[in-house]
Amino acid sequence: MAGPGYEDGYWYSADGLRLHFRDYPGDAGRAPVLCIPGLTRNARDFEGVAARLAGKRRVIAVDLRGRGESDYSPDPYTYVPPVYLQDLGALIAEHCVGPVVVFGTSLGGLMAMLLSLTARPTLAGVLLNDVGPVLGAEGMARIRSYVGTDTCFASWDEAAQAIADNHAGAFPDYGIADWRIWAHRMCRAEDGAIRFDYDMGIAEPFKLPAPEPAFDLWPAFETLHGLPSVLIRGERSDVLEAETASDMVRRLPLMELVTLPRIGHAPTLEEPDAAAAIDRLLAKVDHE
């Protein structure tokens, strides 16, 4: 199969799942962009980013296990970062020639930090989209409140309205056309109904007791030192708090911070200021 501007690609995890990515072709002489979505999202989140960049450089947009067109895991406790890291390492080894520029949204940004910690030579640059080593308590409580809820909608318009009802405070300038785009990216049509496009089992690891002591992501973040990097933050974000973002650029002075006004968690990266920051990041990668 293929879609507008991309081919469907597949690879296999160590535990035998067939995992999917969208492969948008581009200049093989430039470092490709590897897009990793957030917790409940999928490769479609990067349609706008890929449409703007494809042709100029290759863009690979991933469906993590249990999302989109990737297989669901029979064991929900494999929906955890160490396993995602193993999956992504296999993808990079099999399908990428040379280092990649990782665009990581939310969970995808955490994976970018872990890739830097464990496989730094595979990275040419990093964009962290609305996430940092410390996650806002309010944002995490909000995510826990909805993840794994198998809601069914009668139509795409109903799905769009439900998404708008839940997220309008984070995106006050969005209109119904924007929410319809979100619905088509977040949901799938199945048996005459519209559902969120992920395995509800991804919520199971959230029910486990928090590890003691808590895992410290600052050392992983600090391995980004020396890599071209950008931090995108939505001004209204409850996941990446302003204090954390300031601490991040204090620790990595070469990291560019771009704050998007009147945007919450998580920006689409299609916003003009985000697109301009992406262009600066990729120009720096190409130069280096």
Image: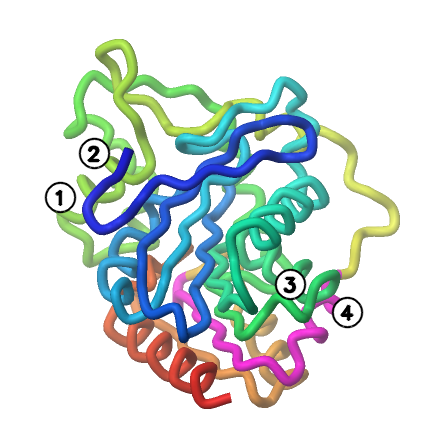
| Mark toward the start of the polypeptide (2 vs 1) | 2
Which contiguous range is marked in magenta?
A: 217-236
Q: Is residue 107 visible?
A: no
Measured in 3D between alpha carbons, the distance from the residue under mark 4 to the one under mark 3, in whole angstroms, is 9 Å
Name the spot of residue 205 as percent of width and height, x first.
Answer: 68, 31
Q: Which mark is residue 176?
A: 1
- Confirm or deny contact between disc 2 and disc 1 (CB under 8 A): yes
Q: Residues within 10 Å of mark 1 (few under 14, many from 20)?
A: few
Q: Which mark is residue 219?
A: 4
Structural distance between the alpha carbons of marks 3 and 1: 35 Å
Query: Considering the numbered disc 1 on the image, is that residue within a helix, a strand or a loop?
Result: helix
Whole-angstrom CA distance, mark 4 to mark 2, is: 41 Å
Q: Position of residue 155 (x, y in %)?
A: 17, 21
Q: Residue at x 19, y 53 (%)?
A: 174
Marks 2 and 3 close (CB-CB < 8 Å) = no
SS category of the residue bearing label 2: helix
Q: Residue at x 33, y 22 (%)?
A: 195
As drawn, is 116 to the left or to the right of 188? right
Contact, CB < 8 Å: mark 4 with mark 2?
no
Is 196 within the magenta?
no
Residue designated by label 3: 113
Which numbered disc, 4 or 2, marks the residue that appears first in the sequence?
2
